[in-house]
Image: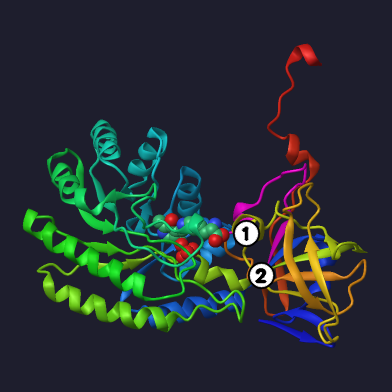
Amino acid sequence: MFSSKDGRLLIEEVDFEEIVEKTGTPVYITSRKKLEENIRLFQESFGFARMLYAVKANNNLTIMKIFARNGFGADVFSLGELYLALLAGFDRNFILFNGNSKSDEEIEAGIKAGVKFSVDSLDELYTISEIAQNCGREVKIAFRVNPDISAETHPKIATGLKTSKFGIPAEQILEAYEAAVQAGAVVPVGIHCHIGSQIRDVEPFVHELEKMFEIAAELEKLGVRLEFLDMGGGFGIDYEGDGECRVEKFSQPIKKTLENGLQMLKSKPELWIEPGRSLVANTTILLTRVNAVKKAYKNFVAVDAGFNLLIRPAMYDSYHRVVVANKMEKPAEELYTIAGPICESGDILAKDRKLPKVKRGDYIAVFDAGAYGFAMSSQYNGRPRCAEVLVDGGLFHITREKETVGDLIARQRIPEELF
Ligand code: LLP
């Protein structure tokens, strides 16, 4: 999918510079083949589960359509993500509207679209019930349970600890379901959980699912008929190594826990998972051009993409592999720090990497940028967002045009007295 020929980076069969000629830099480039390989890997390893693609990781419509066509459901977290998921053609029976702070407008749109809800508080339950009654609809819901499980990952993306803002504490969860049974127009049919993101160990997932089965057994006693247990996403990838997710390492112990757990229950709920990163991260590179190189405290390579386009290194100290795309076969000689164009010292994409000698006009490819890359981009510093491209064998398609400075002012209005 990503290889080199005559010292140059190829995406499938396309030389990176063919794309640059059309889109300029920076540009996000996705390999369709890699995406479909990941999809197959998950379908084979998690054949026993229903998969909902976590749209937040990458909401490029073309990518979303590929998931929808491959039978995925969708985890959406906002009105915008719901809109995109409906447009991409996901089956609304398997769209789950998540979120800890949904507006009345979002709730009404979800109800009218006929999707299921993950409910984050009792307050939200009553709001959904009221709006559903006003719309004359019935809504299937799950509660998001906070299982108080600690998993090793960056603190900003650990979500299953009791200190986290997400979900209802496990001790209060039965009370919540009782309330749901009483409330009008809502039918509790699932349990939802998500313990965090970029988790490399399987044990926290096993604990999570065991805890969900304990709750499920209690819920059966209350007469709740469970259709699904949704354990969320979070499967980590090897950013420092080959960028892959070891899917089998997760799926096998989860399958065993599922089989054991189902024996405890009378009903046979489906297992749902909501992967995002592990499906899309390694399908995509961010290609950026070197504007200047200088020897200062360090060897700084100033490129045209910064945390406006890829915020992960600045926000979570994340590591992304980098290569010099036009010098793939040259020996690594010196340590370089790759700096973006944003006016903040934290705008560093990669620190102290040994690379071939870098010069102005070279191209740097940042790997594993397909998850939470473009999706978290901004126009900070007056920088229009870049294009996105999908490579398909020897062809490529621009799936999102780059923005122009016009997009910076598109929604702005100057008050008349300042004309
Ligand atoms: N389900 C729920 C309810 C979630 O909150 C998330 C991610 C997922 C599924 C998908 O998790 P994944 O499989 O992608 O780990 N911006 C951060 C990651 C934030 C994750 C937020 N929630 C990053 O760049 O690392």
Is residue 112 in the magenta section?
Answer: no
Foreground residue among 391 and 162: 162
- Please rate how many residues cluster around mark 1, counting C-alpha atoms within 10 Å: few if below 14, some from 14 to 19, many from 20: some
x, y (%) of residue 79?
46, 43
* Disc 2 to disc 1, C-alpha distance: 9 Å
Residue at 36% across, 39% down: 107
Foreground residue among 58 and 278: 278
Instruction: Return the residue at label 1.
Output: 312
Q: In the drawing, what numbered circle is on residue 2?
A: none
Range covered by the magenta-colored residues: 372-390
Residue type at mark 2: give it: His
User: Counting residues from the N terminus, which is met first, the one under dot 2 or under dot 1?
Assistant: 1
> Of helix, strand and loop, which one carries label 2?
loop
Foreground residue among 148 and 143: 148
Instruction: Return the residue at label 2.
Output: 320
Under 8 Å from ligand 1: the CB of mark 1?
A: yes
